[in-house]
């Protein structure tokens, strides 16, 4: 959903003036969703930047971060969003329903009569939900192949292809060729993605949040296709990102992280890709360390963990030697990175593969 309200350099998805017992509220709405390409811990940064603008020019204002119901996002995503907020210059509430004053971080100010808000009309190109998803993904990764954008935006290949072609027509992305055709976001596309998320103009925001490394093509390809890989296996996946640096994980960055459900259990799907450029002992030690970090992260948020290692068969076998301390809430899956969409069954507390 593109913004339609403006206050100074900040844009918002809506403005509400609810009747509260003490007066009329002045509530600006930002929409947050797993489908918009942004990891949940960055929504707090969006809210803080928007809050700075409101505090300076609209002292009566408060922010409602409108999110999908828990049934759609699960507990983990919502908790990550809430914990990312930190101190904000204006009162903030998070939820799927219009909040009462008691739901804000501190009591919001009220007015005697509704205050107007500047409306945006005709400022943005008309783009569909699939196009918004693809744009958000490319804002994170900068450039990628159609299959990678489809996987990260959780749509089919034909839908992604059609969405990218439409974005190209509006000069939000361009298609280039380097051995194979790929897509790259333009400056205009980056600007629209930032406004789509609600980031004010001029704000310092980590737009390119995919980890910057000299990762080999095959390694990065497996990471970006992780969502599609899991869905091909049959897992219930809500969303995911490639190469993210996680808060509270001691600076560790999984090659990809997705989340969803295994049966009735909310689950994180943590991916490590092993290219085999180390000795067998180094591979085993690295796998052990990353498994322990992943289990600690899942324990911190009270969800289950499917830790998967993909790579060349010999490297996967070497990694298995380091995976001995597996918690009851975790499962380890080992797979061949050449066999897209194939993984062993989950067995809690054990290694499969």
Image (spheres, rainbow, N blue to C red):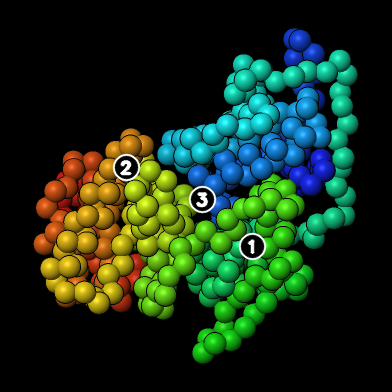
Return the x and y of residue 227 as percentages of the image width and height: 43, 60
How far across and down, in percent of the image, does residue 6 sit? 81, 43
Residue 2 x %, y %: 73, 50
Viewer-proximal residue among 95 and 193: 193
Label drawn at residue 39 = 3
| Residue 166 visible (yes or no) | no
Q: Residue at x 28, y 43 (%)?
A: 296
Residue located at (17% from left, 68% from top): 282
Can you say whether 111 is above or below 124 in the image?
Answer: above
Query: Residue 122: which quarter of the image?
Result: bottom right
Mark 2 surroundings within 10 Å by alpha-carbon count, few (fewer than 14), some (14 through 19), many (20 or more)? many
Name the mark on residue 143.
Answer: none
The mark nearer the N terminus, 3 or 1, is 3
Quadrant location of the C terminus?
bottom left
Write down the residue under mark 1: 135
- What secondary structure is marked by label 2? helix
Q: Earlier in the sequence, mark 2 or mark 3?
A: 3
Kindly report the distance in space between the C-alpha atoms of the residues bearing marks 3 and 1. Answer: 14 Å
On the picture, is 289 further left or further right than 266? left
Tell me what residue is drawn at x 11 percent, y 53 percent.
Answer: 324
Question: Which residue position holds label 2?
Answer: 298
Circle 3 SS class? loop
């Amino acid at each position: 959903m593109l913004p339609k309200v403006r206050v100074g350099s900040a844009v918002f998805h809506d403005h509400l003036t609810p009747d509260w017992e003490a007066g009329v509220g002045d509530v600006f709405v930002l929409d947050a969703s797993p489908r918009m390409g942004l990891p949940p811990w960055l929504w707090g940064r969006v809210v803080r930047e928007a809050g700075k603008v409101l505090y300076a020019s609209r002292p009566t204002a408060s922010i409602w971060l409108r999110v999908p119901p828990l049934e759609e996002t699960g507990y983990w995503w919502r908790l990550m969003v809430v914990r990312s907020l930190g101190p904000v210059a204006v009162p903030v509430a998070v939820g799927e329903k219009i909040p009462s004053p008691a739901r804000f971080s501190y009591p919001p100010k009220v007015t005697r009569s509704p205050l107007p808000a500047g409306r945006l009309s005709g400022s943005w190109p008309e783009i569909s939900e699939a196009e918004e998803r693809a744009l958000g993904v490319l804002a994170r990764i900068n450039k990628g192949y159609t299959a990678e954008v489809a996987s990260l935006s959780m749509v089919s290949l034909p839908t992604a292809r059609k969405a990218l072609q439409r974005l190209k027509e509006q000069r939000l992305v361009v298609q280039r060729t380097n051995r194979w055709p790929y897509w790259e976001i333009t400056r205009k596309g980056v600007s629209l993605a930032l406004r789509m998320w609600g980031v004010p103009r001029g704000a310092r925001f980590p737009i390119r949040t995919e980890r910057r490394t000299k990762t080999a093509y095959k390694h990065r390809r497996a990471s970006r296709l992780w969502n599609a890989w899991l869905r091909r296996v049959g897992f219930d996946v809500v969303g995911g990102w490639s190469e993210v640096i996680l808060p509270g994980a001691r600076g560790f960055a999984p090659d990809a992280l997705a989340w969803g459900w295994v049966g009735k259990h909310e689950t994180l799907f943590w991916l490590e890709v092993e290219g085999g450029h180390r000795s067998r002992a180094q591979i085993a030690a690295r796998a052990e360390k990353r498994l322990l970090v992943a289990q600690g992260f899942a324990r911190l948020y009270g969800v289950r963990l499917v830790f998967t290692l993909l790579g060349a068969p010999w490297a996967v076998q070497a990694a298995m030697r380091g995976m001995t301390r597996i918690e009851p809430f975790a499962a380890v899956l080992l797979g061949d990175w050449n066999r897209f969409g194939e993984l062993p069954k989950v067995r809690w507390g054990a290694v499969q593969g």
